[in-house]
Image (tube, rainbow, N blue to C red):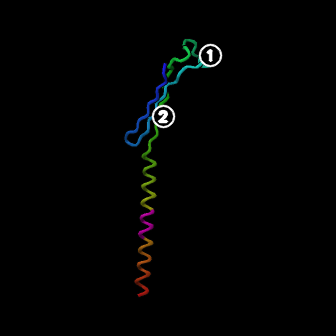
């Protein structure tokens, strides 16, 4: 039986699904299984929205900081005139 993996990316969520394929070691507990049988699946989901929110927050902080630096320089220039 061929091993097949599935990966999807939707709504900023990465989803990876892999089959859990029986090995000789699995037969110690799973006596009815044959080597190569699919005993189950492993699904891993990672929500990237949190990472995108952090990126946006850092971007916003940088923009605000840049604005205040520009404002500070502008006010200094006015005071010198």
Crowding around mark 1 (Cα neighbors within 10 Å: few <14, some 14 to 19, many 20+) is: few
Label 2: element kind: strand
- Residue 12 lies, in percent from the top left, at 40, 43
The prevailing secondary structure element of the residues shown in magenta is helix
Q: Nearer the viewer, residue 22 or 51?
A: 22
Q: Which of the 4 image quadrants contains residue 10? A: top left
Figure check: 24 above or below 52 = above
* Vertical arrangement, residue 49 with respect to residue 61, above or below: above
Q: Tell me which numbered mark, 2 or 1, is placed earlier along the sequence.
A: 1
Per the image, the residue denoted by label 1 is 28
73 drawn magenta: no
Reading the image, the residue beneath label 2 is 44
Report if residue 63 lies within the magenta region.
yes
Q: Residue at x 43, y 86 (%)?
A: 80
Residue 56 locus on image (x, y percent): 42, 55
Q: Residue at x 44, y 76 (%)?
A: 72
Question: Element under label 1?
Answer: helix
- Tally of numbered tags: 2
The residue lying furthest to the top in this view is: 32
Please tell me the numbered disc located at residue 64: none
Q: Specify start and end residues of the magenta stretch as a single range.
A: 62-67
Give the answer, above or below, for where 36 lies relative to 65.
above
- Name the quadrant containing residue 78: bottom left
The x and y percentages for residue 13 are 42, 40
Q: Quadrant of the C terminus?
A: bottom left
| Residue projecting furthest to the bottom | 81
Residue 76 in the image: above or below residue 58? below
Furthest toward the front, the residue is 2
Neighbourhood count class around disc 2 (C-alpha, 10 Å): few under 14, some 14–19, many 20 upward: few
């Amino acid at each position: 039986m061929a091993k097949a993996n599935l990966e999807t990316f939707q709504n900023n969520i990465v989803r990876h699904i892999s089959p859990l394929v029986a090995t000789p070691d699995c037969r110690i507990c799973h006596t009815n299984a044959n080597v190569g049988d699919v005993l189950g699946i492993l699904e891993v989901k990672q929500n990237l929205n949190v990472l995108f929110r952090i990126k946006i927050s850092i971007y916003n902080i940088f923009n605000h900081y840049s604005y205040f630096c520009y404002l500070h320089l502008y006010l200094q220039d006015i005071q010198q005139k």
